[in-house]
Amino acid sequence: MALARIQVPPQAKRGEPVEVRIVIQHPMETGFRRDANGVRQRRNAIVALVCRYGGVEVLRAITSPGVAANPTLRFHLRAEKTGDLEFWWIDDDNVEGSAKAQLVVV
Amino acid sequence: MKRRHFLALSLISLPFSAAGEPNAHVSTIDPLVRSFTGGKDVLPGKVTLVLPRIADNGHSVPMTVKVDSPMTPAEHVRAVHLISEKNPVRDMASFYFGPHLARAEFTSRLRLNGSQRVVAIAELSDGSFWSDMVQVEVREAACTED
């Protein structure tokens, strides 16, 4: 469940906006869908996602099944110094996931 | 005033007056809206919610939210809330951020259960609330089809 891909440019200039993209592999099960046997699938969606840059929280998202399966997020960080970009999330089953990427600032 | 003149006038003036008034996109007695705003007025403007007018598939609808803000420590966006009109879970997502983001803008994908209006509410650092609303025609609804 902890499959994700983070995309950041290989280098960023200090003070400039950096495009950060993340895709998390997750079904974001709504709780309303039935499988081929007509059995209702239990809701299981990511409910919270946190992004930290250099140990500081920069973005927090509270999500629901209203977000499409395999959630994507794209935003622009302000490059300050070289550091880790850490994502952490948790779903309805209390399964946590995380992903990390390094942001190199020159 | 003739009836047809009155009708023409109301057609012209209605959209403009509706767009400028507080709470044009939200209901002030909506508990979900109140949970975000604490009963404060939500003014239309400053936020741009970008959604396709027609979505073939409600399972994955690309969405971008832009807020008119310099994103400085003194003046930035605190949060953006997305509210659905017809999803079983109306409280679709809330994004909390601050001056660490270079731009008050993000992109994601939504699930929409049928044609509906989607509202984005942005909370700025000065405590004001701003909104935008988009009507999306969804050809194939997500979630509840059986």
Image (spheres, coloured by chain):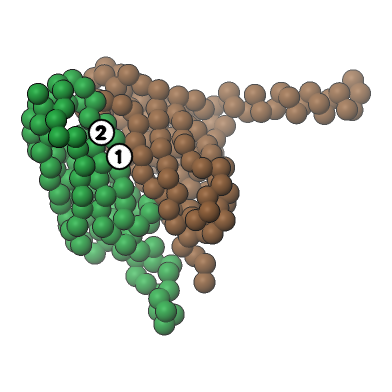
x, y (%) of residue B133? 52, 37
Q: Which residue is mark 2?
A: A19
Residue type (three-letter) at the residue carrying disc 2: Glu
Above or below for B2 versus A100: above
Determine the residue located farthest toward the top in the rendered image: B74
- Dot 1, how many residues are within 10 Å of its Cα: few (below 14), some (14-19), or many (20+)? some
Q: Secondary structure at mark 1?
A: strand
Q: Tell me the shade of chain A.
A: green
Dot 1: chain letter: A
Which residue is drawn at the image coordinates 32% and 62% (left, top)?
A27
x, y (%) of residue B67? 39, 27
Horizontal relation, residue B37 to residue A63: left or right: right
- The N terminus of chain B is located in which quarter? top right
Q: Quadrant of residue A78?
A: top left
Query: Would residue A17 be visible to someone looking at this image?
Result: yes
Determine the residue located farthest toward the bottom in the rendered image: A37
Q: Decide: marks 1, 2 in contact (CB < 8 A)?
A: yes
Q: Are marks 1 and 2 on the same chain?
A: yes
Above or below for A77 versus A36: above
Q: CA distance from mark 1 to mark 2?
A: 7 Å
Query: Would residue B36 be visible to someone looking at this image?
Result: no
Which residue is drawn at the image coordinates 88% and 27% (left, top)?
B4
Query: Considering only order in the chain, which callout, 2 or 1, is on the residue closer to the N terminus?
Result: 2
Tell me the number on the disc at residue A74.
1
Above or below for A73 versus A17: below
Q: Quadrant of residue B39?
A: top left
Dot 2: chain letter: A
x, y (%) of residue A47? 29, 53
Q: Nearer the viewer, residue A106 or B142?
A: A106
Residue type (three-letter) at the residue carrying disc 1: Arg
